[in-house]
């Protein structure tokens, strides 16, 4: 049926029904959805002409969660203290008036480092360590701690450099050793060549999705959004679809994953999975999911709310509990955990949304998953 494959356990058939209706309505659309509940995989579905169960796609900002989980592990281990200054771990960061910026402010998008003067060059977009060198000497664009703005690209290099200074390992290697490999999580910060056969490159929106849509104007180059989302190439899709970008794996926008990998990572933050204890203690998880920044976002010029790194639900997700934490991606993919219902959700789509961000499909699936999970706990 419509290229649909996989299954859903009893109690989660509503998710399969929603997914099937989406597949029927758009039979050329490749997508995956996976759901864990109480540490068990209960939904694993995929559809589309080229999608497979183990297909890997660029998940854009969904992949930032890999960095946030690594930071949480360092906090949990006592190696990273939230209210210490960043410069304590990374002395060069103290330049240009940043000597008092705390780790907590940095993780909660309050550091004022949404970009660098003149923008990043192409090599720096591929190399988080090179980007971190630029950020260390950059003056903040607002007084740190007084406001917040989404650090769209820079949060990855910033966290990555903290990880490197503390552990001596790159974020890529730390994530692989502590999260991906021991937990069998299909989420790659830098894709090894042997996994290339599993890759599906992203596709642009189809003309029917673009028709009737007002074009989204590019932000002014000297605006905070212009600084935060500046890319020195005209073909952004070509950039992220290139093997060079996949291999480099800049964590803010270069992570590849499957829906199963996303859901499994979030499930591992909540519960024991396949006999392994939860990655994060409840205290750590609650700290990272607590509201740290809320209100007007200086970068996005709209309301937003963040924990430590993670996005927290707002008005667009009234069906999620206030304890939910996760991250969406510019192409329409999404991952989150809802501790209130012990739900972990992952959704990956190949075709980019227009104008970007979550589409109705993601909300329909997430709403169904949350409803099913809550219903199971009611028994």
Image (tube, grey):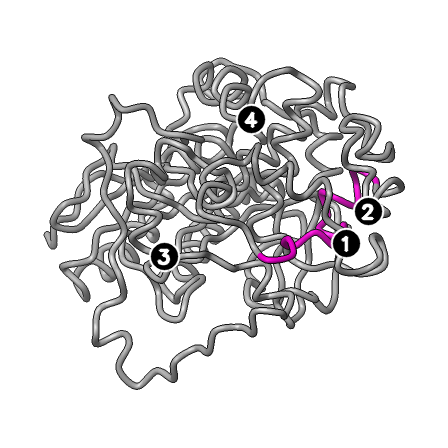
Q: Secondary structure at mark 1?
A: loop
Start-end of magenta stretch:
102-118
Q: Nearer the viewer, mark 4 or mark 2?
A: 2
Label 4 crowd (10 A; few <14 / some 14-19 / many >=20): many
Magenta span has 107?
yes
Please give the label number shown on residue 96: 2
Sequence-first disc among 3 and 4:
4
Please give the label number shown on residue 171: 4
Q: Secondary structure at mark 2?
A: helix
Magenta span has 260?
no
Label 1 crowd (10 A; few <14 / some 14-19 / many >=20): some
Question: Which residue is identified by label 1?
Answer: 140
Front-lying residue, 187 or 172? 172
Front-lying residue, 77 or 343? 77
Question: Which residue is identified by label 3?
Answer: 236
Sequence-first disc among 3 and 2:
2
Q: Report how far apart the C-alphas of labels 1 and 4 lie in the structure.
A: 24 Å
Q: Nearer the viewer, mark 1 or mark 4?
A: 1
Q: Secondary structure at mark 3?
A: helix
Label 2 crowd (10 A; few <14 / some 14-19 / many >=20): few
Q: Is residue 75 above or below residue 337?
A: above
Q: Report how far apart the C-alphas of labels 1 and 2 lie in the structure.
A: 8 Å
Sequence-first disc among 1 and 2:
2
Answer left or right for 46 relative to 139.
Answer: left
Q: Report how far apart the C-alphas of labels 4 and 2 lie in the structure.
A: 25 Å
Answer left or right for 14 relative to 157.
Answer: left
Are dots 1 and 2 in contact, CB under 8 Å?
Answer: yes
Front-lying residue, 133 or 284? 133
């Amino acid at each position: 049926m419509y290229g649909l494959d996989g299954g859903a356990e009893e109690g989660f058939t509503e998710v399969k029904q929603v997914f099937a209706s989406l597949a029927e309505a758009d039979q050329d659309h490749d997508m995956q959805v996976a759901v864990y509940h109480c540490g068990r995989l209960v939904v694993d579905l995929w559809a589309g002409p080229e999608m497979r169960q183990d297909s890997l796609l660029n998940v854009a900002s969904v992949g930032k969660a890999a960095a946030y989980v690594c930071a949480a592990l360092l906090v949990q281990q006592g190696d990273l203290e939230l209210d210490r200054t960043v410069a304590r771990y990374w002395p060069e960061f103290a330049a240009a008036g940043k000597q008092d910026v705390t780790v907590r402010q940095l993780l909660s998008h309050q550091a004022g480092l949404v970009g660098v003067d003149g923008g990043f060059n192409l090599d720096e977009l591929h190399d988080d360590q090179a980007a971190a060198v630029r950020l260390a000497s950059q003056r903040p664009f607002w007084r740190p701690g007084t406001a917040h703005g989404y650090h769209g690209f820079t949060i990855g290099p910033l966290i990555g450099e903290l990880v490197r200074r503390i552990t001596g390992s790159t974020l890529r290697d730390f994530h692989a050793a502590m999260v991906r490999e021991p937990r069998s999580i299909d989420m790659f910060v830098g894709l090894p060549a042997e996994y290339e056969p599993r890759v599906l490159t992203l596709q642009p929106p189809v003309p029917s999705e673009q028709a009737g849509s007002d074009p989204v104007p590019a932000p002014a180059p000297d605006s905070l959004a212009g600084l935060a989302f500046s890319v020195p190439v005209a073909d952004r899709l070509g950039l992220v679809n290139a093997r060079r970008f996949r291999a480099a794996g800049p964590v803010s926008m270069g992570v590849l994953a499957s829906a199963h990998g996303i859901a499994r990572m979030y499930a591992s933050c909540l519960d024991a999975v396949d006999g392994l204890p939860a990655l994060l203690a409840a205290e750590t998880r609650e700290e990272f999911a607590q509201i740290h920044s809320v209100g007007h976002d200086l970068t996005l010029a709209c309301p937003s709310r963040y924990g430590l790194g993670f996005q927290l639900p707002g008005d667009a997700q009234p069906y999620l509990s206030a304890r939910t934490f996760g991250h969406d991606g510019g192409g329409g993919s999404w991952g989150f955990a809802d501790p209130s219902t012990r739900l972990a959700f992952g959704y990956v789509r190949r075709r980019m949304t227009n104008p970007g961000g979550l589409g109705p499909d993601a909300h329909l699936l997430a709403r169904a998953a949350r409803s099913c999970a809550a219903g199971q706990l009611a028994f």
